[in-house]
Amino acid sequence: MSDAPKMRYETWRALALWGEEEEAAALEVLRSRSLFRYYGPDLRHRTDAFEAAFCEVTGVAHTVAVSSGTAALTAAMIGLGIPPGAEVIVPGVTFVGSVSAVVAARGVPVFAEVDDSLTLDPAHLEERITGRTWGVMPVHLNNVAADMGPILEVARRHGLRVIEDAAQAAGVSYGGRPVGGLGDAGAFSFQLDKNITAGEGGAVTVSDADVYDRVARYQDQGGQFTTSKGATRGTGDHPPFVGANLRMTELTAAILSAQLPRLVPMCRRLRDVARQVRGETADLPIRWRRLPDEDGSGGDLTLFLDSRLQARALVADLNAAGIPAHTMYQGQPVTANRAVREGRTPWGVEWERPPRLRTSEALLGRSVTIGLGAAMTDEDVDALVIAFRKSYQDITRAQ
Ligand SMILES: *Cc1c(COP(=O)(O)O)cnc(C)c1O
């Protein structure tokens, strides 16, 4: 048993709003006995419906539902035609799944620094481009979009494909446009911690019909069932290729669809909570993480302290006061992962030790992220402000 103090509120997102809609949606699929998306005794086409609804949320022409966020990233790159051995630039601050997907798509990850937004630094992205660079994967971290304006500008100038890792940002937008529709393809995750969830799940968003066709085929064994549905999917005028099975189940899609109407309001609420906390502590000299588009964010409260030690002290103090707080990824860039650092894939060593990402390491290491939950009450927010003010002042004065 952990002796961690009990938190005043939960940090779940979709899970905090879980209701009868999920139960009814799941029961309907169970009773239909048709859990496979392409046929069954009484198929309800829940995966088709989820894809259509997700297009509405993201404003993108096509969605392909898949089994995970990593699967979505992999399928997106394969859909875009990544050549074997091609380099994809990934920010140093991300979940290892971004890297796994590049490996699964037979690419080679190259790592770039983040800036004070904790998302890809467009200037360092440009420095990392070589003749082998094929694509870039900006990561929208913790409900905050990467600075897509300058990133897209660099990518366009160098002819790079842009795959948005939107695993942590469903419902978030940048410049008034939802993430997932800003680059050449977007990838979402529906794992338990994400904005909508069925335990596992993912989605690829694309606007190009040919890319859509390739993604749809790849996730379905090269088109085992998609092509048998005739004109409903894809253009069908490409030579066949061998794919994989990354299909979503009807149960997953039904549960996700039940949550979709809550997604954007939930992001708005979390953004307003974050805004309120920043507003009510504006008299303190806090260095908040830069938000490239605060209006489109889905709620993030991350600040930088003077040192790792100070960050650790603030986390401990907040936790003791019942406020959920942590340093993302234990303060380590993804290149600190031993397999990533050593370039080890299931097929052997595929890249040389990446250079140390000193800026990313320094920023992430002295950052603290305060957890926000979708079911937070106004009283929870008031308690958070009081506890945070006190902890911040105690910790920064003490050192
Ligand atoms: C969760 C996540 C993934 C992977 O999603 P899974 O559904 O767990 O495969 C990829 N990238 C980022 C940034 C994530 O947070």
Image (tube, helix red, strand yellow):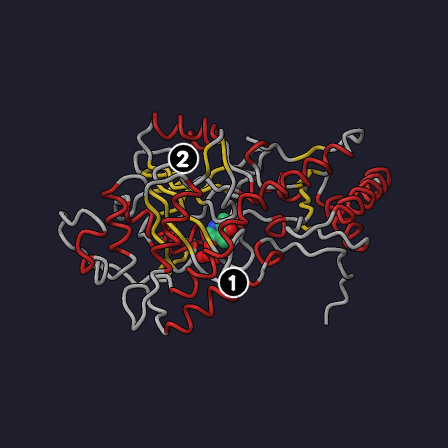
What x and y, as percent, mark residue 37?
Answer: 32, 64
Q: Nearer the viewer, residue 287 or 86?
A: 287
**Dot label at residue 346:** none
For disc 1, the neighbor class at 10 Å (few under 14, some 14 to 19, many from 20) is some
What x and y, as percent, mark residue 389?
Answer: 82, 40
What x and y, as percent, mark residue 159?
Answer: 30, 30
Please identify the quarter of the rendering in which residue 248 is found: bottom left
Q: Which residue is mark 1?
A: 22
In the rendered structure, the answer to whether residue 341 lies left or right of residue 240 reads right
In the rendered structure, the answer to whether residue 190 lies left or right of residue 19 reads left
Q: Is residue 317 visible?
A: yes
Please identify the quarter of the rendering in which residue 182 is found: top left
What x and y, as percent, mark residue 160?
Answer: 33, 34
Residue type indicated by callout 1: Glu
In the rendered structure, the answer to whether residue 55 lies left or right of residue 4 reads left
Q: Nearer the viewer, residue 356 or 142?
A: 142
> Where is 367 relative to 347, above or below?
above
Q: Which residue is mark 2?
A: 182
Quadrant where the C terminus is found in the figure: top right
Q: Is residue 341 visible?
A: no
Q: Residue at x 38, y 44 (%)?
A: 55
Q: Nearer the viewer, mark 2 or mark 1?
A: 1
Per the image, label 2 sits on a secondary structure element best described as loop
Residue type indicated by callout 2: Leu
Q: Residue at x 51, y 54 (%)?
A: 259
Please identify the quarter of the rendering in which residue 126 is found: top left
Per the image, label 1 sits on a secondary structure element best described as helix
Q: Earlier in the sequence, mark 2 or mark 1?
A: 1
Task: Establish whether ligand 1 lies closer than 8 Å to the Cβ of label 1.
Answer: no
In space, the residues marked 2 and 1 are separated at their CA atoms by 30 Å
For disc 2, the neighbor class at 10 Å (few under 14, some 14 to 19, many from 20) is many
